[in-house]
Amino acid sequence: MKHLILGGARSGKSRFAEELALASDKRLIYIATAQGLDDEMQQRISHHQHQRETRWQTIEEPITLAATLAQYADKNTCILVDCLTLWLTNVLLAGEIIFQREYTALLKTVPELAGDIIFVSNEVGMGIVAADPLSRLFVDEAGRLHQALAKISDRTTLVVAGLPLSLK
């Protein structure tokens, strides 16, 4: 089962995703895509790490998400990827060649994987149009990524104010 969970900042999407995964009887893997490049982000990462139950095996992977998923996915595993928008930022900033390679690899690999995979991502396309080109590119690519993953996912959920709304 592939499940895409979307929502705004602090919408409850990660909590919802973790609750779904914890309800399974499978081995739990948490793939974290964030990079602690500044003090504030390091504090966020630390907070998330301390909040997580000890059943989780955590893998930090900011770029090669498809290869990491392929390495760990099996029928006895539930993988939670948090979050796709941070991963998208990482690959966009890594340059066009890496972005294209990793984006294409993810969309090609996901349908072939066994086990449960839960993707968490920020819905960023519901606000004003960004003022600068890089921000507009990010919003556009996030929208395209969400559409592509929703199409190949078994379920898609939007979380608003802590309430999950089933879209698919």
Image: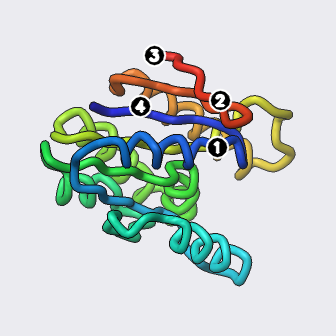
Q: Which residue shows up at 50% across the image and 44% down it?
A: 120
Q: Earlier in the sequence, mark 1 or mark 2?
A: 1
CA gap, disc 2 to disc 3?
15 Å
Label 4: how many residues lie within 10 Å, few (<14), some (14-19) or many (20+)?
A: many
- Circles 1 and 4 in contact, beta carbons < 8 Å: no
Q: Amino acid at mark 4?
A: Leu
- Viewer-proximal residue, 16 or 124? 16
User: In the image, is residue 99 above or below residue 118?
Assistant: below
Q: Hey, which residue is sitting farthest left in the picture?
A: 75
CA gap, disc 1 to disc 3?
19 Å
Badge 2 element: strand
CA gap, disc 1 to disc 2?
8 Å
Give the side of residue 147 with respect to residue 59, left or right.
Answer: right
**Label 4 sits on residue:** 149
CA gap, disc 1 to disc 4?
20 Å
Q: Position of residue 16 (x, y in %)?
A: 53, 41
Label 3: how many residues lie within 10 Å, few (<14), some (14-19) or many (20+)?
A: few
1 or 4: mark nearer the eye: 1
**Label 3 sits on residue:** 168
**Label 2 sits on residue:** 163
- State the mark number for residue 137: none
> Which quadrant is home to the C terminus?
top left
**Label 1 sits on residue:** 12
